[in-house]
Amino acid sequence: MIDIRLVREDPGNIKAALARRGVDPSEIDDLVALDAASRAAVGARDEVRAEIKVLSKQVGEARRDGDSATAETLAEQSRAAGERERELNTEAEAAQEAVRQKLLYLPNLPAEETPDGAGPDENVELRSWPETAPTYADHQRVPHWDIGVELGLLDMERGAKLSGSMFPLYRGYGARLLRALTSFALDSHAEEFEEVRPPTMVLTDTMISTGHLPKFSDEAYHLERDDLWAIPTAEVPLTSMWRGDILDEADLPLRLTAATACFRREAGAAGRDTRGLLRVHEFDKVELFAYCTPDQARDLLETMVARGERMLQDLGLQYRVLELCAGDTGNSAAHTYDLEVYSPGVDMWLEVSSVSWCSDYQARRANIRYRQADGNLAFVHTLNGSALAWARIWAALVETGRQADGSIVLPEVLAPYLRGERVIPAA
RNA sequence: GGAGGGAUGGCAGAGCGGACGAAUGCACGGCUCUUGAAAAGCCGCGAGGUGCAAGCCUCCGGGGGUUCGAAUCCCCCUCCCUCCGCCA
């Protein structure tokens, strides 16, 4: 969440920053009013509490002096104050909770460098690869869902039979390809990023820390009986690994990588991209994550994007890099780059990575701080990025690699992970 | 699932109705000494909120309760450890 003090000190500035992402300025006015009310209520309660403390101390003294009459008089006064305290406390807590709720729903402030814009159409294309766009043959213009059926790699019908639509089931070479991608990715990050295998079901507090709750509860799967949430991305558990902790500055940046399944209800996208792997409820993804100081954040963002790009080049997939505009940047992020691959069979650009700098928005929610050289505490910055999301990569690889005879040639870099078998034979 | 023991500052660990926001050690910061460093000595040092400030308030796993007053007593919950049961 954003720092309430910034709102208090300069509401106009916050209004302007959040207006860039479509937040109504009146929201900030509401927040300022709630905050003022909260501080007044807390102050009133604290005064009574101070009174009770003084009285209690005096009761003790009177008792020691053997003056039981005075002790009883003071105790009576304290009891009366206690009743007032209970009322004022109820008010104060309600007022504080109102401020917190308001803050939990407000998105992060966009970074200065994040370009203006209202939605996806105004994102900025920074670069693309390869420099000259490839041409694609007719045999590459076959959608992956057809290829999947033809070669026995993807069985969406049986997936739906088990779990409903948009739950893919991979078979044979198709399943092995996924496993190869995950191994390839983790190995390539291993030198700089510690490999983690976190739980995929998490507590409500864990989801709140990243900003996925309370605002986006419709997008997540919830197991009611145990009150657990299926993670939409490894970013969620990784952010909470150090929730509530104080890190040493010397340990920063702390870099992690994790492969997990990711679960998304896609409630807001019902009926869109329903075929194949373009949009699914469960997919595997390798995530990069970092905790760092504010000074380290911008460089880290660039190096994480570079890792994603490097992998796409290694996989031989055509891609472009988008800098998201303020209006399209995710709730928790200050600045985001998306990587999109071109998939010739469906003739679409598919988002396969989103790399975000969340400034201290998540750290504030999760209360993750570090001790600076001067001894003071400050919130860390968090960054996350996919490297990469496999379902759409799988689609692009199968479509791009399709040969005239119907077989599929996979990238050289995956050979070690495919027992040397880079070619999925034609049917 | 059953039985017992725990949870206190960055870490370790005392405290078990009032003088406790909390001993002590380590870590950390400053200073002295030193050519420099180490060692030693001295001083400082939990966090959050609010206030111009002095100050005031909150926090001893979480939530309730008893009491004039709770880290300390009672109840519930969570997590950790030991033992038993079950289990991939």
Image (cartoon, helix red, strand yellow):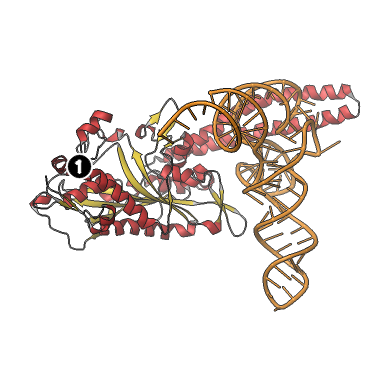
At 25% across and 46% down in the image, what residue appears?
A: A392
| Residue A243: x %, y % from top left | 52, 44
Q: Secondary structure at mark 1?
A: loop
Place residue A54 in its image quadrant: top right
Place residue A77 in its image quadrant: top right
Task: Tell which of A47 and B58 is nearer to you.
Answer: B58
Looking at the rendered structure, the kind of residue marked 1 is Leu
Task: Tell which of B49 and A211 is nearer to you.
Answer: A211
Can residue A116 be spotted in the picture?
Answer: no
Q: Is residue A268 left or right of residue A424?
A: right
Can residue A49 be spotted in the picture?
Answer: yes
Q: Residues within 10 Å of mark 1 (few under 14, many from 20)?
A: many
Q: Is residue B75 left or right of residue A175?
A: right
| Residue A21: x %, y % from top left | 36, 45
Place residue A304 in its image quadrant: bottom left
Q: Would you name the residue on which mark 1 appears?
A: A153
Label 1 is found on which chain of the structure?
Answer: A
Q: How many marks?
A: 1
At 48% across and 59% down in the image, what residue appears?
A: A295
Placement of the C terminus of chain A among the 4 image quadrants: top left
| Residue A208: x %, y % from top left | 46, 38
From this view, report whether residue B69 is shown above or below residue A260.
above
Task: Tell which of A156 and B31 is nearer to you.
Answer: A156
| Residue A136: x %, y % from top left | 12, 55
